Structure formats: structure tokens, C-alpha cells
Amino acid sequence: MTQAGSVAIIGCGVNNRPLVPYFLSRGRRVVVADRRPPGVLEAELAAWRGKDLTILGGADYLDRLVEPRGLQTAYVTPGMIKHLPQLRQMAAQGVTLTCETDLFLSQSPAAVLGVTGSAGKTTTTTLIGEILRRSGIATVVGGNIGRSLLPELDRLSPSGWAVTELSSFQLDLVRHSPRGAVWLNLSPNHLDIHGTYAAYAAAKRHILEFQDVVQDWVVMPADSQAVSDAAGGFGGRRYLFSLDHPVSAGAYVASGKIWWQPAEATPVAIMGVDDVRLPGRHNLHNVLAATAASLLAGAESGAVAAVARTFAGVPHRLERVAEVEGVTFINDSIATAPDRTSAALDATAGPIVLIAGGYDKHLDYAELGRKIAAAPVRAVVLVGQTAEKIARALREAEARCSVTLAGDFDQAVELAYRAARPGDTVLLSPAAASYDMFTNFEERGRRFQEIVGRL
């Protein structure tokens, strides 16, 4: 079924699909293995019918893939558990397990600027891309943000930048790091896939672990012991960012302004903090990281200020949806972990009616329970697999807000609306992933918008 030198593509979703034409156009034999039915895969890959392409579909796709000999490399889809027995067997047979991200990092003619973290990746990635473009620098943006950059390889400029959002899933199997790295923060997430917090942190560390210590650079938070511990002594030249104090090299806030501190030079004032359009302390954190990374990549300080003054944010991130009879509705569906919801609570004026709950990633909700208890939250409506876990955390925190469990998402939004009074904010900030009810957090956010539209 497979032949010497064959390439396996395990999982043929958005991230991995560009690998099919990439390898077929280079004369490689390709085996696509995916749990979806063969007919569905054949229809999606019809453009390459007649090429040296084998499709293994169905529930037993991994078992069928490990049977034959001859596989050289397997490109594993990002969200797959990497310690599955079939993958371990393939590795024992000498198959190299890797990923689309590592291929792009190794082949990109443009310098790669990667952004990772437990929260804020998309906002920071988008900010950097906008700043570089405004500075006249050839720039493409992709990665976990929803667009593979592999099809762009032939069009990338060696003098430009490829700005890529990198999730822990995408970094898990890489053996190359980007020229410039941004590590925003680190808190437990995706433990259902990585198994342990240590494994999750180790995957994140790959963004800097393989950097050249002289030519490459990394932007990190000055005040995160978690990131500092996980990064260890790896990475290139280090630049820091801080909301609370000056740094020796990097970006910081002081006297109501954002400052850029070049290494061993005079600091430069970029703009006033009050001029940043994005709401919340966590977004100011993202702006500082984007400031440092953009300036290191050659952007102009004026471009940083111009973008930060006008950038209103990315959909599903503290997005104001509507006001209905004096009640404001905010869509923060991106909040797929407790720390994201905590940040949203800090950025939202009370009183708040919070909608939370969703797919269980095996995270701890005790701290979020205490956060909600101390925040101006009047009512909480819970839904999904984590509803009982969050309710228990609220009881243990002795939260005084009312707590209601909804049967489904639509009912949760309707119950939140009934609980709200004029002047309140209904905040969708689930602190959980969406997979128990929706395909992804974007679909969840759109559903919230549709329901609010009916109201």
C-alpha cells in the first residue's frame, strides 16, 4: 500500500490539506489517513485524482496506516494526541513524526516571526502583521489564525516576514524555531491532549528551543515566572515587556506611556496608554509584546502608534454585539480557558451576567470561582460539560451571585437575558472549549450573535 519514501498525512483538515499538493507536485508518494469516510475524502481531494495518492478513511484509519512498511515521514495533524499506540508503533518502525509547521519553518524564504502563549495569540499576531505592513514591510500572516502559509512559499519575499500564530499543538513536533519569537504567557490548557502541564509547557518552549543564540530573538513577559521557568536557558537574544516597570531591553509602561527600550540605548516614547483602542489590561499586555516584536522586525515607531490607536480587535474577543433594552451583550467566545475569562471580567464593567461552560479540557476552575466571587458578577448561567465543575468552584468560593444551569446553549443565552437588568452586561466568556456543542469557538460566537439578534 505504501512505498519507500512515502509521506503520510495524518488528518486532512485545514492545517494539513496543503501538504497534499506540496508533496505531489514534488513527485512524492502521498498517503492521506483520516477518520472521515473514504468517499468524503475522495471528494475533497478530487483535484488530485490520478496522482500518486492513496486514501485511508474510516474509524480504523490509523490501524491500516501502520500495517504496511515503507513510510518515511508522517505529518500529524495538530490536535491529535501524540502518544497514541499507533503513532508510537510508527516511530518504533523508524517513521519520522513531524508536522506542517516544522516543514514551513524549515522551508520559508521569509524570516518567520512566531507568536505563542496561552491567551492573546491571535490579537498579537494580527497587530504585528498590521504594524509591519503599515511600515512598508512585505508581510504575510497565518498559522493557527486559520490560514496555512505553506501554499505561499513560492511567493514569500526573502526580505519580508511571515508572521505566524503557533499553538502548542503546532509546536509539539517541531525541530525548528522561528527567527523571531513572542511568548506571551503560560497557564494550564489543553491537558486533554497533552496529558500534563509539563508536556504542554514543553511544547510551547519549542518556539525558542531551536533558535540561534546570536541571530534570533525572543520577546517574553518580564513578570511571568511560569514563562521564565519553562523557557529555561533556551532561545536567542531576549527582550522583555512589562506593564509595571521599565526593562533593560524591550517595551514597558511608565508615566502613562508605552516606551521602547533598545538594548543599551535611550528609551523612546511610542504613545500614550490611554490612546490604545483595545480594552483591558490583558490587551495592553498584547500591545506591548507586539510593539517589541514589530520594532525588532524593522517596523517604524509611528506605525506602532497608528495601528494601536485604530485597531478595534479580532471577532469573538470582547466583541460588543448589541444593546437590547439597556442590556449590553459582549461576545468573548475565544475564552476557552479560565484565565481568559478572568481577563474578560477585569475588562468588563459591571454588573455582569456571565455565560460560561463547555467542553472539558481537564482544567482547574478553583481560581476562576474565586475571581467570579470577587468580581461584579450578579448572575452566572452555566452550560456544557464543565457546568458542574464551575458551579462547584463557585460554591467553594462562596460566591454570592445566582447560579443557573442551562440545558443547551440557546437556553443559556435566553436565561442570561432574563436575569439581566438595564445597565447590565451579558458576557459570553465560557472558560472552556466549544467542542461539546460546536465545531469551534467561532461557531459558538456566531450562534451567540444570532440569538442576540433575535432578541
Image (tube, helix red, strand yellow):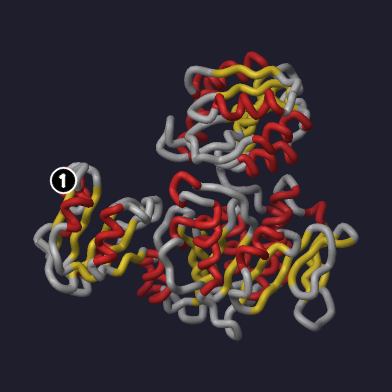
Q: Is residue 254 left or right of residue 181?
A: right
Q: Is residue 316 visible?
A: no
Q: In the picture, which quadrant includes the C terminus?
A: top right
- Residue holding disc 1: 38
Locate the N terminus by quadrant.
Answer: bottom left
Outermost residue, bottom side: 214
Placement of 193 over or under 324, stated as above or below:
below
Q: Can residue 429 be seen here?
A: yes
Label 1 environment density (alpha carbons within 10 Å; few <14, some 14–19, many ≥20): some
Q: Which residue: 40% across, 69% down?
A: 102
Residue at image point 12% right, 57% down: 49
Q: Amino acid at mark 1?
A: Pro
**Percent of width and height locating residue 218:** 62, 72
Dividing the picture into quadrants, the one containing residue 92 is bottom left
The outermost residue toward the top is 418
* Front residue of this view, candidates 85 and 162: 85
Residue 121 drawn above or below residue 220: above
Residue at left offset 64%, top offset 56%: 185
Q: At numbered mark 1, what does the secondary structure look like: helix, strand or loop?
A: helix
Residue 431 image offset from top left, x and y in percent: 59, 37
Q: Nearest the camera: 408 or 301? A: 408
The x, y position of residue 188, in whole percent, is 58, 49
- Residue at 50% x, 63% y is 164
| Residue 30 location, quadrant | bottom left
**Percent of width and height locating residue 12:** 28, 53
Is residue 47 left or right of 86 when viewed as pictured?
left
